[in-house]
Amino acid sequence: MNTLTIAWKSIRQRRLASLLTALSVALGVTLMISVLVINGVIDRMFNQTASGYDLIVGPKGSALQLVLNTVFRVGAPIENLPYRYYTELKKDPRVEEAIPFAIGDVTQTGGFPIVGTIPRYFALEYVPGRHFRINADGKFLPGTWDSVIGSAVAKQNNWKMGDEFSLIHGSAESGHVHDEKFKIVGILAPTGTPNDRTVFVNLRGFYQVSGHEKPLEEAIRREAAFFGETVDEEKLKTLAKENAAHDHHDHAGHDHAGHDHDVPDAQKEVTAILVQMKGDRLRGFTTIKFQSELKEGNQAQAVNPIQQISWLMTNIVGNIRTMLIVLTSLIIIVSGVSIFVSIYNSMSDRKREIAIMRALGAGRTTVFAIILSESVLLCLGGGILGIILGHGLVFIAAPIIEARSGLLINPFAFSSVELILLPVLVVLASLVGFIPAMTAYRTDVASTLSD
């Protein structure tokens, strides 16, 4: 009978104590596995989603807020940029792609964020190497009043092709409901990004929604101030008279069919512009130079989304992750201490057993190895059970997280830290089992048997 067999039989003799001790290790490992796997998925999602574009151009203000609002549709926009700024930006010879975003409304049902954009957005990769896919009969915003919805929106609102919906300016609870309706012409396949919980509408239709255009005089003055130009008052009066005949607000309440009309560019605004720069070898240098030029001016800012997300993950999410890992590590250490207490307390009851083993020919080293093996078996057993429970917990939580946040979590995801977890448990078991093993090693055979 070898050492491990004897150790296993000893553990079975103390079933309840051994089970509770191994379970305490398993719970600590379960928490650590869950934290590592879910954190890894979130980290990849944030960084991949933010890496589809070189820069995000938006109004001056918080760079992180600009990224969170534009890419992840979290929080309110900083401000808006004149539409003319977008038209001039996309003509820059260094710019490969410039995709405008108009954000600020939500759906009346579900409160999902609305993004006004152009069909070209769906022709580009949403993360490197991945393109948008749409249902078989779907289309990417060909008409003014067309919309494309994310998979999570379709599932939660039970929307299908041909359904119509209204926009709300502000919050879903207390905002103003617009009369115009958009028609669903496409449903995106799941992407595992915030696009799944987003409703995209044609930018032309977004501008034609009542209240989305600024009053002409105010818009012209704001545009002139933005570009540092002087307003021609006479021309402004003439334009005001020409546009007075068509007051957009007069059309509120009637069907939008046949109501398509041009909105002057001066009255249009964009919340942000997604930018891809030209070139391959000098792309990084061009991007940095472009950022610096905007930083020196007072019109807008160009933000590298990856840098902002890296800062967020390192300084905020990273600190929370570290705290959780430290807490779960302490739980495992406490579990190790419970193994020590369990084995050490059993030594007084096992002195006669150990003395008999010694009398039958077992050496001190053999007895030492048996006690140490018990500690290792308890730790490894708890660790393996914890890994299974941890992935099982992620498997159960994955659909719940997806339903609540739209985040796709692979239930079979694996963290590289798991590779060192079991070796660490073996080291921990060796440390906590050393003193009880030494106690067994020093057992005096003669005095124990005589007692």
Image (cartoon, helix red, strand yellow):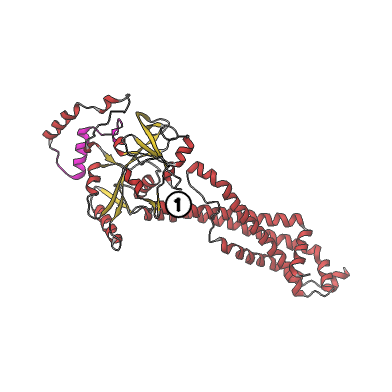
The quadrant in which the C terminus is found is bottom right
For badge 1, the amino acid type reads Met
Residue 260 location in percent, x, y?
Answer: 27, 31
Observer able to see residue 320: no
Name the residue furthest front: 137
What span is in magenta? 207-231
Residue 314 included in the magenta stretch of the image? no
Q: Is mark 1 on a helix, strand or loop?
A: helix
Residue 3 location in percent, x, y?
Answer: 75, 69
Name the residue furthest left: 234
Residue 183 location in percent, x, y?
Answer: 37, 33
Residue 216 included in the magenta stretch of the image? yes
User: At 75% from the left edge and 63% from the top edge, which residue is drawn?
Assistant: 8
In the rendered image, the vertical position of residue 109 relative to residue 353, given as above or below: above
Tell me which corner region of the image, top left, top right, bottom left or bottom right, holds residue 444. bottom right
Relative horizontal placement of residue 136, taking residue 249 as reference (left or right):
right
The quadrant in which the N terminus is found is bottom right
Relative horizontal placement of residue 143, taking residue 329 as reference (left or right):
left
User: At 44% from the left edge and 47% from the top edge, which residue is drawn?
Assistant: 191
In the rendered image, the vertical position of residue 351 relative to residue 146, given as above or below: below
User: At 77% from the left edge and 74% from the top edge, which residue is drawn?
Assistant: 364
Observer able to see residue 340: yes
In the rendered image, the vertical position of residue 376 relative to residue 190, given as above or below: below
Relative horizontal placement of residue 346, taking residue 169 as reference (left or right):
right
Report which residue position mark 1 lands on: 45
Quick one: label 1, few (<14), some, or many (20+) residues within 10 Å?
A: some
Report the front residue among 182 and 307: 182
Residue 284 location in percent, x, y?
Answer: 31, 60
Report the front residue among 140 and 90: 140
Report the front residue among 170 and 259: 259
Tell me which corner region of the image, top left, top right, bottom left or bottom right, holds residue 114. top left
